[in-house]
Image (cartoon, rainbow, N blue to C red):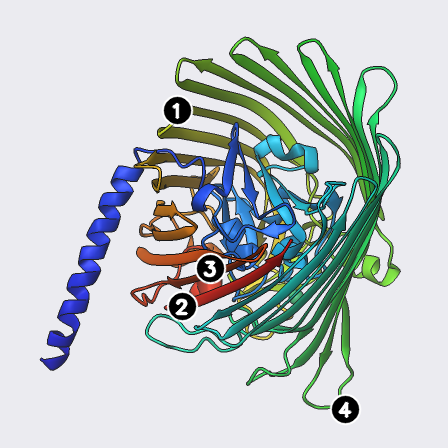
Amino acid sequence: MKSTINVFPLRAIRVGFLWFAMLCGAFMSALYAQENPADSLKLINLSEVVVISTGRQLDHQKQRKPLSTLDEFLESSRSINMVKRGAYAWEPTMNDMASERLAITIDGMQIFGACTDKMDPITSYVDVSNLSEAQIGSGQQGAAFGNTIGGGINLKLDKSNFKPTGCNGSLESAFESNNKMRVFGGELNYSDEKFYLNTDGIYRKADNYKTGGDEEVKFSQFEKYNFSVNSGYKLAEGKSVSATLIYDEANNVGYPALTMDVSLVRAVIGSVSFNQDTLFGNFSNWESKVYYNTIKHVMDDTKRPDVLIHMDMPGWSETAGFYTQANFNKEKNHFFFKLDGFYNKSYAEMTMYPTNSNEPLMFMLTWPDVRTKDLGFYAKDHITFEKASLKLSTRLAYHSNTVADDFGLNSLKIFYPEMEKTNTRFLKSFSAQYHKMLNDFHFNGGLSYGERAPSVSEGYGFYLFNSFDNHDYIGDPNLKTESSAEANVSITYKKSIFEITATANYFRVFNYIIGVVDPSLSTMTIGARGVKIYNNLEYTQLFNASLSGRYNISNAFKLTGNVSYHRGVDNDGENLPLISPISYRSALDFYKNQFSASFSVEGAGTQTNYNPAYGETKTAAYATLSASIGKRFFINENNLFVKAGIENILDTYYSSYTDWNNIPRMGRNFYLTISYSIN
Ligand SMILES: [Cu+2]
């Protein structure tokens, strides 16, 4: 009885808040959020730009949580959702498609993770301290970054670019109460018209986080360092060279949703570029880059209880590549040409140590030293008319995979005796995107076609355990090229104080690659339910729609919101995995006299379209509330920013469809960020 009385006021508040949230949501759905967390998103046609920092400084003024992880920044985007296996290294998805179907680059550089279990999406190898923005292209609009089905994301590095700013620097620190995350960061920059040097470093350490209701999520800790240096030198007017180097290392990273953790993951990412403002004829902005990156990933099960057979599972990925690009303007035609190529080496192994030490060790190559060569040509023509424009683009690529390790090749030949060492494909992408302005209305519509090659795991993976559906996966080197036909539309009504956009896209993906159970095979992983082989489904259909809005209530107050709907089915009408239920988000932001505040709600409906065959269960509806306040102080010529906030105010216990094995999300969390910048 007593507990009921105790609970009642809380429930009343919760219901009240939810009601308010729904009201906001409904109201907001009638508005358009071109800019999400206080201006951090800018919409470029159907794609987005997530601004992370401006002028070598994290934007403490406008970001609700300036030192949040890059993952949190990306999640705040309208078009990206993040799949979570713990507190670290979330996996971006766009249009309900994940890594294999996206092209993700860092400053135009191709990088491939070194983990067979997707513990290390590319986005985990940089931090907010390195970046200026995330450029997002939906569907084939992301093909500038590589072959893709779902879209492309380019994480643009932050550089001074010869701005005459002289010396400046900043020190930053943050603390989060829930997992006791400590963040320390700093940067030191020099820039003049002939030379610039940017350096930054960031360190994050977090303990296990706690769910709503204060349950500890074991193995959710992590520790990460990131350092970067980039520099440029002007050889002559309109001619410069630049170089970048990023070192990123994470240790003792827990993955509570998986059966293993990570003891070490290290990336070294470097590039040298040559830039020239002009080229022969009408060519301009000529930029060329050569790059190299190497990643080492070491999984660790030694801290887990009840490990029957200890396993060592290290993986390596090395990529070397280049691109050269230029613009070409002729009257109404604005061309962009890019030639790019890369060479990747992916190698991963597994050693099993039987409990009886007299038994022999078991060794397998889970990625058999797969060498991928890719040479691509991308061209775009942006044709401008009066109050209208047409964008035509294409990517043509030669793509080949070779299994370089004979032991690995022979292992795969058990399943595919006829398989060739090398598999070559020719990949194509075409896209047409039309934009028309009519008074305050903007219409966008596009049709496109794209192709992608299977990933290393899909083509050559050897007994990769997937804890989501509890199956071992084997690749198929003879998979057909996956292709997609895509249509998109959007309508925006735009006034200076008010904006609303409705968008929708549809993908029909042919030869959709997904694991299908092969009952004739027996498992390698103890406790696995069966073995799946990557297969081409005849086709699948994906549909995404959203309604978003912005309303400037006054100069100081701004209201934004977004509601989205998603659906994904295969050719038998069965649900595809990891498709978002209805989700919504709304925020009220205040900014005046160097003082900022925000109140936001985020939530999703019940996941009714789930598929148990892929290990999914019905995820319940949820809503969470967050708030923040911040103030900027001037000390002499310098700036001090202080920001504090609460996330999940009501300490709701929940998980979303993106949470691997429904691992519960973080409960109530207080954060404090302090930044001091010296100009
Ligand atoms: Cu891993």
**Marks 1, 4: nearer the viewer:** 1
Image position of 612 with respect to 427: above or below: below
Whether the residues at callouts 2 and 3 have beta carbons within 8 Å, the answer is no
Sequence-first tag of 1 and 4: 4
- Looking at the picture, tell me which residue is in the foreground, 150 or 71: 71
Label 4 environment density (alpha carbons within 10 Å; few <14, some 14–19, many ≥20) = few
Image position of 476 with respect to 491: above or below: below
Q: As drawn, is 666 to the left or to the right of 277?
A: left
What residue did someone put label 2 on? Answer: 669
- Looking at the picture, tell me which residue is in the foreground, 335 or 41: 41
Instruction: Identify which residue is drawn at 85% across, 63% down.
Output: 407
Question: What kind of element bears circle 1?
Answer: strand
Label 2 to label 3, Cα distance in Å? 30 Å
What residue did someone put label 1 on? Answer: 494
Say if residue 374 shows up in the picture.
Answer: no
Question: What kind of element bears circle 2?
Answer: strand
**Residue 417, x across and y down, in percent:** 79, 52
Q: As drawn, is 73 to the left or to the right of 513?
A: left
Whether the residues at callouts 2 and 4 have beta carbons within 8 Å, the answer is no
Sequence-first tag of 3 and 4: 4
| Quadrant in which residue 215 is drawn | bottom left
Amino acid type, residue under disc 4 in the picture: Asn
Instruction: Identify which residue is drawn at 39% across, 18% down.
Output: 440
What residue did someone put label 4 on? Answer: 358
Say if residue 103 shows up in the picture.
Answer: yes
Sequence-first tag of 2 and 3: 3
The picture quadrant for ligand 1 comes to bottom right
**Marks 1, 3: nearer the viewer:** 1
Label 1 environment density (alpha carbons within 10 Å; few <14, some 14–19, many ≥20) = some
What residue did someone put label 3 on? Answer: 615
